[in-house]
Amino acid sequence: MTTARNRIRRARAVESAMRLVTGTAAALVVGAALGIVGYVLWRGAPSISWEFLSQAPRKFMTEGGIWPAIAGTLWLVVGTAIFALPVGIAAGVYLSEYAPRGRRTRLIRLSIANMAGVPSIVYGLFGLALFVLLLKIGVSILAGALTLACLTLPVIITSTEEALRQVPQDLRQASLALGATRWRTIRKVVLPAAAPGIVTGAILGLSRAAGETAPVLFTAAYFMAPLPTSSFDKAMVLPYHIYIMAVQAVKPAPHVVWGSALVLVAGVSVINVAAAAWRSHMRKKVTW
Amino acid sequence: MSGIAYGAFELADVSVAYGRETAIAGVTMSIEPRSVTALIGPSGCGKSTLLRCLNRMNDELGDVTVGGSIRLDGQDVYSRDIDPVELRSRVGQVFQRPNPFPMSIYDNVAYGPRTLGVRNRAELDEVVEESLRRAALWTEVGGQLKKHAFELSGGQQQRLCIARALATKPEVMLMDEPASALDPISTQQIEDTIAVLKDDVTIVIVTHNMQQAARISDRTAFMLRESMDRPAGLVEVGDTRTMFTKPCDPRTEAYITGRFG
């Protein structure tokens, strides 16, 4: 009798202790996220003005704005999307819909997992060696976008495959049983049903690319460049601008660093929140 | 006989193997056109496997070998001249759980004809209406074809799936326990639909429910896997009334009187 009561008492104690431990961990994460964003907001907000967003830098970049860096980042992200989305989504479709189960498929998955684990500075060196030097593209938005595309591919492939896997097998069966080919089944039934997940994964991958410094360090970024007019131009980009202003500026200008950081964080957050909102909207429309 | 589609199947010594394991072997039977044939037997006896041979849906599972011969109106279903994709518009299938596409009622039914290349709006409208009427769903949804298929009840969704399969004008309709996920009233509606459809479509239905087999089928095939180290096979096939009153084989009698399975 007493042993049973003791056991229950002990179980209750463990229960509340675990709730406390896991809850604290969750609170720490929220705290860290809010702390980072809050600090960036606090330090960066005073620098934000229309001039800061729309003008080119002046006086060794200590005054004026960061518009060329914003524009350069946009160029790079769009370029990355152009290269990474078709290849990534197609590879995800292959892995989920066509690939036979076997050694070759396992090898492909392993390669993708490895690609995701490669440090971004290595992508930067690889981009320099392959795109800039070997293919003679030169330091340019094109070379940077190709490098960032390599970095983003694993994220896009994996999230595409995951989204396709969520589509019930029943739907594929129904389509095939109606005399549709595999490709028609994919195009008409599977891809539309998986679209919210694929788009969300793609956006998360691209927003990650927007914030990367190392891959563009040797391939696209330039300390002080005018507004890009073609994809063969070097460009200023936000993460590199922050890096260079923080460690190598001729005259320290912390307000530029924090202002740029705020612009980058805000841009990426807006995109991520929009992606999440859009997905939950689509989820309501399509459920199984 | 040749040239005219009847929807008659002839199975001779059919066997199916998944990888190296033979699932069913030695099935010889005929499926008569414009009638309902029920496949009954305990779980794991290969009913669904046999059913999926008839429209070559087994092909999609990967490592599957089908032996023997399966002829649809005299033509070998597994011959090189037959494209499984084309075969499936002649041999439709309805699945265990209702599986409408996440699109409108209209687009669900029009999916098959569109796959076959029908683009003409008037023609599609006509096929959609006719198929929904044949599946006894038109009176309920005729006025709201743009409605999303997921808004229908489970029973309505299953009749929508029947309509969708009918829209390619198949000669044969395969049904894999089509009412097992439905309530009694919806089951009744599906059974009523089957009774009407068999006038112009051959129906092969897998069912766990022996009363259902007795109610709706003209012929019944009883399948059994007697031990795990031997493949399943066909015990007997015959007129449903005879099967349920005077079965030839003692194993059939044991199963239908509920002694096992």
Image (tube, rainbow, N blue to C red):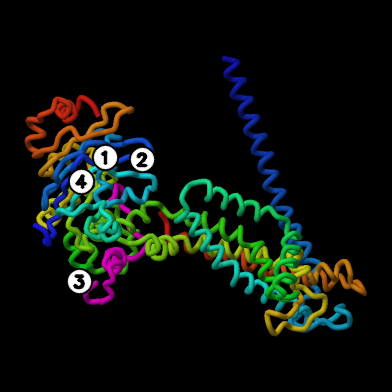
- Residue range in magenta is B95-124
Q: x and y percent of residue B4 in the render?
A: 11, 61
**Alpha-carbon neighbours of circle 4 within 10 Å: few (<14), some, or many (≥20)?**
many
Asked if labels 1 and 2 touch by Cβ distance under 8 angstroms, the answer is: no
Position above or below: A71 against B246: below
The CA span between labels 4 and 1 is 19 Å
User: Within the magenta stretch, is there residue A173?
Assistant: no
Residue that mark 2 sits on = B18
Q: Nearer the viewer, residue B159 or B87?
A: B87
Image quarter of residue A39: bottom right
Q: Dot 4 falls on which chain?
A: B
Q: x and y percent of residue A178 in the render?
A: 29, 59
Q: Amino acid at mark 3?
A: Glu
Residue that mark 3 sits on = B126
Q: Residue at x 63, y 70 (%)?
A: A80
Residue that mark 4 sits on = B205
Q: Dot 2 falls on which chain?
A: B
Image quarter of residue A228: bottom right
The CA span between labels 3 and 4 is 28 Å
Pointer 3 and pointer 4 on the same chain? yes
Mark closer to the chain start, 3 or 2: 2
Mark closer to the chain start, 2 or 4: 2
Pointer 3 and pointer 2 on the same chain? yes
Image quarter of residue A1: top right
**Alpha-carbon neighbours of circle 3 within 10 Å: few (<14), some, or many (≥20)?**
few
Query: Horizontal placement of B232 versus B192: left or right?
Result: right
Q: Dot 3 falls on which chain?
A: B
Q: Amino acid at mark 1?
A: Ser
SS assignment at label 4 = strand
